[in-house]
Image: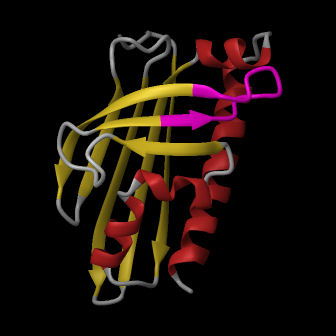
């Protein structure tokens, strides 16, 4: 269902915390409400995320669309390393969310966060289109803010 016109942004941050603790928090999408301000709620059909779990995320796209529900399936899960979720076919817009961690030392972890999404969701959310370069710029800035917030939460 991937559209040719997608936004694809990757961000990286180093967190001073054990990699297992970072992965446990970062891979649990129900924690997204604490570090991603557009997420209203996340539900997981299996309670704890595992391979093939179905994840439902209610997100704020705009005042026009304050509750957008996206349904994802966990398509990859490597314990303490990476998780990838992707929207299922019943969604109107394709999205992919990839989270990877690397242990740099006993208490230092690199986090790599990649989001890919159908560019058309921007017009749906706003009611009008924006240049792709502007959406890329905004998404990168937002991702960096979110990763900083994640770092603050995990380093407490």
Magenta stretch encompasses residue 63: yes
| Quadrant of res 33 | bottom right
| Quadrant of res 156 | bottom right
| Residue located at (17% from left, 43% from top) | 51
Would you place residue 155 above or below residue 78 in this image? Answer: below
| Residue located at (43% from left, 43% from top) | 43
Viewer-closest of 22 and 14: 22
107 relative position to 130: left or right: left
The spot of residue 94 in percent (x, y) is 44, 19
65 relative position to 49: left or right: right
| Quadrant of res 147 | bottom right
Instruction: Tell me the quadrant of the picture where the N terminus can be found.
Output: top left
The spot of residue 76 in percent (x, y) is 20, 42
Magenta stretch encompasses residue 129: no
Instruction: Provide the major secondary structure of the magenta segment.
Output: loop
| Residue located at (26% from left, 54% from top) | 82
55 relative position to 48: left or right: right
Would you place residue 35 above or below residue 22 in this image? Answer: above
Viewer-closest of 129 and 90: 90
> Where are the magenta residues, as a range?
57-68
| Residue located at (32% from left, 56% from top) | 100
Would you place residue 115 above or below residue 153 in this image? Answer: above
Specify the color scheme: secondary structure
The spot of residue 56 in percent (x, y) is 44, 34
The spot of residue 52 in percent (x, y) is 19, 36
């Amino acid at each position: 269902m991937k559209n040719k016109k997608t936004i694809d942004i990757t961000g990286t941050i180093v967190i001073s915390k054990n990699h297992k603790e970072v992965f446990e928090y970062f891979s649990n999408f129900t924690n997204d409400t604490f570090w991603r301000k557009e997420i209203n709620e996340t539900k997981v059909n299996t309670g704890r995320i595992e391979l093939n779990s179905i994840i439902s995320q209610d997100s704020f796209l705009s005042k026009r669309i304050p509750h957008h529900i996206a349904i994802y399936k966990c398509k990859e899960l490597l314990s303490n390393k990476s998780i990838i979720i992707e929207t299922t076919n019943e969604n109107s817009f394709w999205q992919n969310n990839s989270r990877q961690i690397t242990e740099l030392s006993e208490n230092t972890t690199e986090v790599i966060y990649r989001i890919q999404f159908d560019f058309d969701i921007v017009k749906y959310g706003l009611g009008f289109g924006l240049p792709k370069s502007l959406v890329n710029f905004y998404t990168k800035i937002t991702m960096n803010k979110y990763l900083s917030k994640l770092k603050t939460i995990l380093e407490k």
